[in-house]
């Protein structure tokens, strides 16, 4: 793209002085295999969009303070360059808080564990860390602004801040950081179009935009009443929703969504469709909600979007394209470019034991007087093993914790006693006796990404008590999750693990291809294909398959590794001809 000037007047966005309506769709580069970025961007253009929007997840780029990783799937610059090469504009939302149903809302664990820090505020320690992050992120974004010949036309300051706080100095500080680091394009905010949220979540010199998916006329009127000057924009047009483990798969009516989109464009507003393509919470990246009940988000972030989890057009794609065509020019469709085909289904193969966790991963144990958290050990997420010697007698006893975050498998002298689940409200368990070696494996199922529980520590929350008396003298060992796939591939076959352990299977492909891995009978755990982490699976659903992206596969032999905490119900690895995200709540 040649250098241009992007601005807005009282009514509309302006590109080199000419009116421009933003027709955008959300793509999170961090939820898509990087070899598939160009495909998803191109399909957005075919739907009629002229812009691609993305968040930046601080915690993914900066797993330790002072770093900003841009390798592989975190190459933000390459992603934005691909958007520009497709002839499209870009909107970037650096946060620093993004929500996005992403682990911790994008706030890094090392930040959350800073004593007495006040998140999302003008508190000096928080702002110092935010400044370091934004300086690194904006160094990637600033040279790619439209007035430098790049695709970026808008940046968003914070994210739905009016639903969280009212620190105007904080928003002013973020704005100053953006401008000080070379951001020249207009800055926006987003909130639900309610008077209180809009007032708390923006500043007079920032363009306020709305987040909603229905009641378009009412929401636009509320936005205009709050902000008399400037283009109207719904920068999160919710066309679907996300799912929680143990719930239903959420879908929205395609015709109704298209009607709302038509009303939005008919009113002259700009739009960012959330999501154009949701993608996948690969690895341990899913977030969670807790509004009285802890609800972790599933691995799929399909979002019932116009492009499904595998990037294929859905009914919404075609309905949205038809709506956009009534308001703007849409490109012609290449012949056979968007045909939806069933997945290749490899033959079932046996699952083979690759060792119990305690046998193949000995662990590096550290001593603690009181029960530690993951955060105490500097862990961002994952699994932590605990061990203690119980001093009680031979009579049954009750073990209790203040809270379990988020799921704990309890063993006494190597024998399974039971499971404590945060989602079920568990924090006590009856032991057959009060003496012996206690072992507990705890899984962090995703840090809360919305509301007042953002920033809470993970693991066992003490004090731990046995019949009301505190248990002291603990050992703890992290599970090296990133190494488990390689360990399993190198381990000799062993007995099938009936508790936490590793399982593997090999299957053949004629060529690389997308796959739908059947997951509902695999027990409780997480999966890898050829070392690429697909994410978590659960027997309780709703999600029944894991999406395997084509670039993670290869011609010939492919290896699946499972780390299971509860054993599979099947001894075979199978695939499906289609993704299955579970039952829908009618």
Image (cartoon, rainbow, N blue to C red):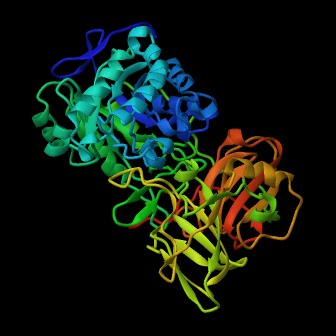
Q: Is 438 situated left or right of 78 in this image? A: right
Q: Where does the image place residue 342, in percent across and percent down from the top left?
A: 64, 51
Where is 133 relative to 487, above or below?
above
Residue at left offset 78%, top offset 41% = 554
Q: Is 326 situated left or right of 440 in this image? A: left
**The residue positioned farthest toward the bottom in the image shown:** 395
Residue at left offset 60%, top offset 79% = 418
Q: Nearer the viewer, residue 475 or 7?
A: 475
**The residue positioned farthest toward the top in the image shown:** 3
Where is 194 relative to 442, above or below?
above
Q: Where does the image place residue 23, in percent across and percent down from the top left?
A: 35, 29
Residue at left offset 34%, top offset 62% = 291
Q: Is 508 situated left or right of 439 in this image? A: right
Could one spot residue 259 in this view of the protein? yes
Q: In which quarter of the image is residue 124?
A: top left
Q: Where does the image place residue 146, in percent across and percent down from the top left?
A: 40, 14
Q: Where does the image place residue 545, in percent across and percent down from the top left?
A: 61, 59
Q: In which quarter of the image is the C terminus?
A: bottom left
Q: Nearer the viewer, residue 503 or 414?
A: 414
């Amino acid at each position: 793209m040649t250098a241009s000037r992007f601005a807005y007047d009282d009514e509309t966005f302006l590109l080199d002085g000419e009116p421009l309506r933003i027709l955008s769709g959300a793509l999170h580069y961090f939820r898509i295999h990087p070899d598939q970025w160009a495909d998803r961007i191109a399909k957005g253009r075919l739907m009629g969009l002229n812009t691609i929007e993305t968040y930046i997840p601080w915690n993914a780029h900066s797993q330790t303070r002072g770093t900003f990783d841009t390798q592989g799937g975190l190459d933000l610059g390459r992603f934005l360059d691909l958007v520009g090469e497709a002839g499209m504009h870009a909107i970037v939302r650096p946060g620093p808080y993004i929500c996005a149903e992403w682990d911790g809302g994008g706030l890094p664990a090392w930040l959350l564990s800073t004593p007495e820090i006040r998140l999302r505020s003008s508190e000096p320690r928080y702002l110092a860390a935010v400044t370091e992050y934004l300086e690194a992120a904006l160094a990637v974004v600033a040279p790619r602004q439209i007035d430098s010949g790049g695709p970026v036309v808008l940046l968003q300051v914070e994210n739905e801040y009016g639903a969280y706080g009212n620190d105007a100095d904080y928003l002013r500080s973020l704005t100053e950081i953006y401008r000080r680091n070379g951001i020249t394009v207009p800055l926006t905010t987003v909130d639900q179009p309610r008077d209180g949220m809009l007032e708390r979540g923006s500043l007079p010199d920032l363009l306020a935009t709305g987040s909603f998916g229905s009641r378009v006329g009412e929401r636009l009127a509320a936005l205009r009443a709050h902000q008399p000057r400037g283009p109207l924009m719904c920068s999160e047009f919710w066309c679907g929703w996300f799912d929680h483990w143990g719930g239903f798969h959420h879908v929205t009516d395609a015709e109704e969504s298209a009607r709302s989109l038509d009303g939005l464009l008919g009113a002259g507003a700009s739009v960012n469709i959330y999501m154009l393509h949701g993608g996948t919470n690969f690895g341990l990246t899913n977030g969670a909600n807790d509004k009285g009940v802890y609800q972790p988000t599933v691995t799929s972030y399909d979002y019932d979007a116009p492009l499904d989890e595998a990037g294929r057009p859905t009914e919404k794609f075609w309905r949205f394209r038809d709506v956009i065509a009534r308001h703007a020019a849409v490109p012609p469709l290449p012949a056979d470019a968007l045909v939806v085909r069933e997945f290749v289904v490899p033959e079932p193969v046996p699952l083979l034991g690759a060792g119990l966790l305690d046998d193949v991963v000995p662990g590096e144990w550290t001593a603690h007087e009181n029960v530690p958290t993951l955060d105490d050990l500097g862990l961002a997420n994952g699994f932590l093993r605990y061990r203690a010697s119980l001093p009680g007698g031979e009579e049954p006893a009750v073990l209790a914790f203040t809270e379990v975050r988020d799921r704990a498998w309890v063993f006494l002298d190597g024998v399974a006693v039971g499971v404590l689940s945060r989602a079920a409200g568990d924090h006590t368990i009856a032991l057959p006796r009060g003496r012996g070696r206690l072992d507990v494996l705890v899984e962090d199922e995703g840090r809360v990404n919305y509301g007042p529980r953002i920033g809470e520590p993970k693991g066992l929350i003490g004090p731990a008590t046995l019949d009301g008396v505190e248990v002291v003298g603990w050992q703890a060992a992290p599970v090296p999750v990133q190494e488990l796939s390689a360990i399993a591939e190198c381990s000799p076959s062993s007995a099938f693990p009936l508790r936490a352990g590793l399982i593997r299977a090999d299957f053949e492909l004629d060529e690389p291809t997308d796959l739908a891995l059947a997951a509902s009978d695999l027990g409780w755990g997480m999966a890898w294909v050829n070392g690429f982490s697909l994410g978590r699976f659960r027997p309780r659903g709703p999600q029944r398959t894991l999406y395997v992206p084509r670039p993670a596969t290869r011609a010939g032999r492919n290896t699946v590794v499972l780390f299971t905490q509860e054993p599979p119900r099947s001894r075979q690895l199978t695939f499906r001809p289609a993704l299955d995200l579970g039952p829908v709540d009618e």
